[in-house]
Amino acid sequence: MHLLQLQIQDFRNLSTLNFEPVDGVNLITGLNASGKTSLLEAIYYLSHLRSFRTHQISDLINRESSQLQLVATIQTDSKNQIPLGIQRSRNKLEVRANRQPVKRAADIATLFPVLAIHPDSYRLITGSPSQRRQYLDWGVFHVEHDFFGIWQRYKRALSQRNAALKSKQNDDYCSLWDKELFDMATYIDTLRSKYLTNLQPYLDELMAQFFKDQEVEVRYKRGWASETSLEHLLKSELHKDRQKGFTQFGPHRAELVIKVDGQSAQTGISRGQQKTLVALLRLAQAQQFTEGTGRNCVLLYDDLAAELDSLHREKILNVLAKMKLQLFLTAIEVEQIDLSAWGEKKKFHVEQGCLKDLI
Ligand SMILES: Nc1ncnc2c1ncn2[C@@H]1O[C@H](COP(=O)(O)OP(=O)(O)O)[C@@H](O)[C@H]1O
Ligand SMILES: [Mg+2]
């Protein structure tokens, strides 16, 4: 799967832009504030229906306009071309795939899987556990088709139980959702744990290359103590859950613990190392995606040259060149990125929101 063509209208400073990337590496260069990140952000938005920089839709719509529009053609691995269109105003979102309206964000994510590495990605390590659960669940979602439905059922039961706890309902009432919660939780836990097991060989190989003399550990914690059953905990902790007004244990409290030489990656390594580590977490995920689904995904790497020192940059580019995916890189100068390892490549230059092909 890859992006064949993208027409952008009024996405940040990109007022009208037509982009025809190759199914290899695409290098986008330009001065600061020319619109490089915005271009990657538009591709990301097409897959996730949200940005990696902001939660405010008004940030994304060009200041002179009332709506943004993205019209793309995706080519599947079996060479089918799928038109994809998004129109977003401040209060309305319309998504179409194959000329049909798309109701669920999950459908578009399945059609067009995109991963991103950008200057704020280190927050995957330093930020809240929900970011690491999102990392884990992106992979589970794409590999396990049941996951989305199961997760929706879990979330529904959880919010009903929490509402009952908050309004101090009696034991019987609060326990009405326990069986559904427990059943879904068991399934979610199994899928997450299986995903991490499948991801581990890719992580191990990358970490051995980049963290040579250090031991990097990525461990999954399921959200309740390993020696206890959730079914039992939901009963024994009901009193406390009611006091707190929420369910304390379950997959919504899962965590990915990341350690380097036994020390938490949140505090024990430098920002530079955190950035390298996050890049490797994403690369492993992209590699496992291809293996697990038989499909290719798209990887966006914003400001690669600014994010990594020259040694790590060269090494990461070597890894990327061996991966089967469509890659989008941004840099200020063409010279910062060596593309000699790629066969299929194209260079673009952005200037004040306008795009030019570079020969
Ligand atoms: N909603 C918007 N409307 C118009 N311009 C915007 C909007 N949001 C951001 N910009 C501007 O777009 C320009 C491009 O930003 P960005 O894509 O981050 O550039 P780069 O990554 O090339 O440094 C900046 O000058 C920024 O101020
Ligand atoms: Mg930028």
Image (cartoon, rainbow, N blue to C red):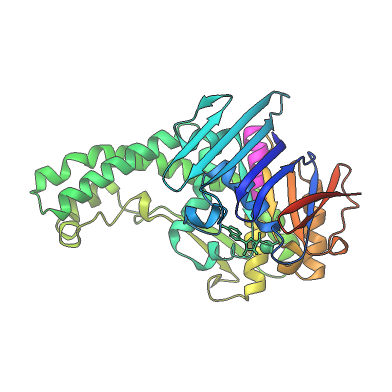
Quarter of the rendered image showing ligand 1: bottom right
Task: Name the residue nearer the viewer: 137 or 265.
Answer: 137
Task: Name the residue nearer the viewer: 214 or 22.
Answer: 22
x, y percentage for residue 92? 43, 41
x, y percentage for residue 112? 61, 37
Q: Residue at x 78, y 38 (%)?
A: 23
Q: Which residues are magenta?
A: 283-294
Whether 36 is among the magenta residues is no
Asked if 151 appears above or below 250 in the picture, the reply is above
Q: Mainly helix, strand or loop, the magenta region?
A: helix
Q: Residue at x 60, y 55 (%)?
A: 12
Residue 125 falls in image quadrant: bottom right
x, y percentage for residue 226? 37, 54
Q: Is residue 291 found left or right of 264 in the rendered image?
A: right
x, y percentage for residue 273? 66, 70
Residue 172 falls in image quadrant: top left
Q: Is residue 223 found left or right of 355 in the rendered image?
A: left
